[in-house]
Image: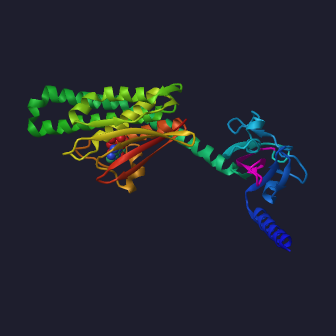
Amino acid sequence: MLTDVLHEQDEKQAELLRSILDCTSDGVVVVDKAGEVVLFNPAAAELIKIKEGERLGLRARVFLPEDETTPFPADELPSARAIRGEETSAVEVFLRNEYWPQGIYLSVSGRPLYDEDGRARGGVVSFHDITKYRQALAKAREAYADMLQFAHIAAHDLQSPLATISGFAGLLRAEYGDAVGDEGREYIGFLVDEAESASRKVEGLLTFSRVGTKGDEFTMSDLNEVLERVLRALAAEIKERGAVVTKGMLPVVRADEVQIERVLQNLMSNAMKFKPPEQFPVVHVSAKKEAGSWIICVADRGIGIEERFFDKAFYLLGRVQGGEDYPGDGIGLAVSKRIIERHGGRMWIESEVGVGSKFFFKLPE
Ligand code: ADP
């Protein structure tokens, strides 16, 4: 009697599971310990053309998405890893076979399956087609590269005329300053200041456009040493502002050391700059490990940024807080973010106005 009820419940659950799998748009395949397919849904049949009784991967020609020709290492596939007890998320693969002669990109995730006693009994993989997304991304990257090249050329061509304007304005002041009177000298002063500000912005644009093309090789870099160098470079400013700088243990990461030093230097000088005039800067640099990545945080107790300006702070030439107390050109954060992205990481802000800001960047371990 009881076994009948349990059996009925099992059947109902299996039926429910089957209807969920039938209508989900992700392909789902369950394999046993030997890699034999035990179950798959219609979306899987459509995407990888799998048939009843077939082994997973029989028709698949799976390649690395970067070059579309190097075979994806079989034991690194999410299905193989799931059988070994490993979880994977959103692994991108390129599939080309007789059904997909042009190839399709799939994003695949895998999870191990265990029986009631906790013994491995296979794995489940789910996947969906990301070809359109990859194509759109490739187009956007191309457009971005074109735009950067344009910015680079424009900035490069502006350097020389700007230097001429500022040079001659300086000469004008030195040689004819007395003749033009106070007002005239003031005008020349504006000219010199603006030409110099424009030159710095142009220089910033060039720096920004060079991040991807003029970077060094990645090496194992001890961020404790990198930060030491930054603090030495900023020693005069730290002293002058009476800043209190503390740090936790930082990791060794694979990075372009010159670029990472630049990031830390930008964040440190901002942390010291954006504080209320009557207050001395307090900055703490720390790191924590999270799911295969290091998260570095530069925290200050400065003026903070409103949440609606978080994105704008990272724009090239984007300034949120200006004026005499906070001079700058809006280059530092844009360059820093681009450097971190070149390292496969990301950068973000947490902040509260009047309390302080935390700038985070995440780097692969
Ligand atoms: P700059 O410092 O030259 O203005 P950045 O690109 O380094 O340029 O910063 C962009 C803007 O982000 C700054 O103008 C400022 O408004 C904001 N910002 C950056 N760091 C901080 C900080 N630690 N606290 C508050 N605001 C900040």
Residue 122 located within the stretch drawn in magenta:
yes
- Up/down of 51 relative to 249, above or below: below
Residue at point 38%, 47% (across, down) = 313
Quarter holding residue 307: bottom left
200 on left or right of 2: left
Q: Is residue 332 magenta?
A: no
Q: Residue furthest bottom?
A: 1
- Numbered marks: total: 0
Quadrant in which residue 192 is drawn: top left
Magenta: main secondary structure equals strand
> In the visual, does 264 lie left or right of 282?
right
Q: Ligand 1 quadrant?
A: top left
Name the image quarter holding the N terminus: bottom right
**In front: 300, or 11?**
11
x then y, percent, for residue 151: 45, 38
The magenta segment: 101-124
Residue 52 at least partly seen: yes
Image location of residue 335, percent across then percent down: 43, 37
